[in-house]
Image (cartoon, coloured by chain):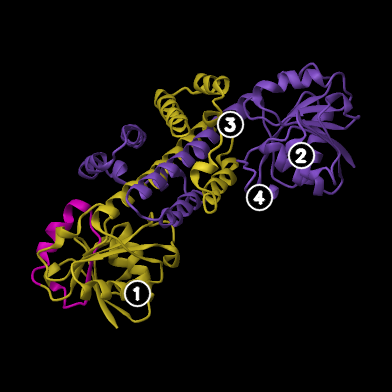
Chain colours: A purple, B yellow
């Protein structure tokens, strides 16, 4: 039984709470957040606290707070025997080096409170300052169930940037698609099969091979027509820059 | 039984050939392309030709050639009783107005020859110059099986632009993600669950609600760190522009 204390109740903390509470061979000891509000509904089945000095001895402390608060929170934990690990993509391992056993437990996924996720499909990217900590984090990851990757801080940061491109930025392109649909009174749902297929295609094809469209074909008539129909300056700029980038990549 | 002649053997023609050949109540009369090469493997089960004057009388002629060839190909067809329809997102209905019955049969999906598609999920966007033609195109669409939308040329062009954003441009962001993974010796497959979830999320959430990440959080430390780690100028520019656009949209 691995005893875990969860720290933070943002999107990542919220979903880790759900999976840890149900994971076999894991005991979720306590859940800490600065304020109790966002944990309050779970007070009946989880020991919640807003006082960090209340935290009992755990095997692993999982810190799920915003990047710029991780180091400070690690310090506030005081001296701990257990592994102090954060869950962030862009924060180096050494942010927690004050602790004898420290590590990173980074679930590479997008989390929103409104959307359930399946941890069996979520890659868990692990790093630790010693073999003991790495092994215990691997055990915890195995109980949660997703594919496990041991990667260093630089690789993790690169992955986090790649994640910003494929997730945050793609989602923003969906938002632009939605805005264009609204402007022209077409339901956004009409684009959903295309969005699903675009994501599905690259399971078997490299995105380089999967590329299609007027930019790739250098179909300048269509490109100019599109730029004429776009009404927002920001959309025109994005269209032009990504068109040029596709053409550059396929030169 | 609707008699269809298919014109063009690019990505769209290739996949329409497959679905029309198997559709109930549809007879694929002939398949024309400028050269026979790309149709040759189907010569045993389809009447193929590279001579446009060979085309017999059909109920519907489906033109699947590049945008700038559609009008010319329509002219080369000569006088026809059947409906002459193109399959392009960005070409107006009137490109085929020389024909008594003309229309548009636009499957809103991304097609690559290497990737099978399921036409039952593909929205078919229809337009025609008269009710007779619209009804027959609707019948053909019903035999193919996807959701049917009747939209005008301006809406279709807007949809096509939106498709460029959500499909071509998102795919390019995946390609950038792949490049970053290669640069840092991490397998690209590690990003696939995130890509799948990003696309899946917006089935129930608006992309505006689904937005996450450093841009939305205005986490400038992370944004600056990411820009420092990116080695390609083009990637830096795209990162900055999309970050600014997300922040502008959520102001």
In the depicted structure, whether residue A99 falls above or below residue A158: above
Sooner in the amino-acid sequence: mark 2 or mark 4: 2
In the depicted structure, whether residue A96 falls above or below residue B57: above
Measure the C-alpha gap from mark 2 to mark 3: 27 Å
Q: Which mark is residue A39?
A: 2
In the depicted structure, whether residue B245 falls above or below residue B233: below
Q: Badge 1 sits on which subunit?
A: B
Look at mark 1 in the image and give the residue it sits on.
B21
Span highlighted in magenta in the image: B54-79
Measure the C-alpha gap from mark 3 to mark 4: 21 Å
Q: Residue at x 71, y 23 (%)?
A: A70
Look at mark 4 in the image and give the residue it sits on.
A116
* 3 and 4 marks on the same chain: yes
Q: Which dot, 3 or 4, sits closer to the camera?
A: 4
Residue A108 appears left or right of A193: right
Measure the C-alpha gap from mark 1 to mark 3: 46 Å
Residue B63 shown in magenta: yes
Residue A144 appears left or right of B95: right
């Amino acid at each position: 039984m691995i005893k875990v204390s969860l720290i933070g109740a943002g999107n990542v903390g919220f979903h880790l709470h759900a999976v840890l509470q149900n994971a076999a061979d894991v005991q979720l000891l306590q859940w800490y957040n600065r304020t109790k509000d966002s944990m309050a509904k779970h007070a009946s089945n989880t020991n919640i606290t807003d006082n960090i000095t209340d935290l009992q001895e755990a095997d692993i402390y999982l810190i799920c707070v915003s990047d710029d608060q991780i180091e400070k929170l690690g310090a506030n934990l005081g001296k701990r025997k257990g592994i102090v690990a954060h869950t962030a993509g862009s924060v180096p391992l050494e942010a927690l080096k004050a602790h004898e056993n420290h590590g990173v437990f980074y679930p590479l996924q997008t989390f929103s409170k409104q959307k359930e996720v399946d941890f069996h499909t979520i890659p868990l990217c692990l790093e630790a300052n010693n073999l003991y900590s790495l092994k215990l984090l691997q055990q915890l990851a195995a109980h949660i169930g997703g594919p496990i990757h041991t990667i260093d801080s630089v690789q993790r940061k690169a992955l986090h940037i790649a994640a910003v491109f494929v997730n945050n930025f793609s989602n923003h392109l969906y938002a632009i698609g939605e805005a264009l649909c609204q402007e022209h009174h077409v339901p956004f749902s009409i684009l959903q099969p295309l969005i699903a297929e675009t994501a599905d295609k690259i399971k078997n094809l490299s995105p380089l091979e999967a590329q299609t469209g007027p930019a790739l074909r250098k179909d300048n008539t269509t490109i100019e027509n599109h730029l004429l129909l776009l009404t927002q300056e920001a959309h025109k700029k994005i269209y032009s820059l990504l068109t040029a980038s596709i053409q550059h990549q396929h030169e």
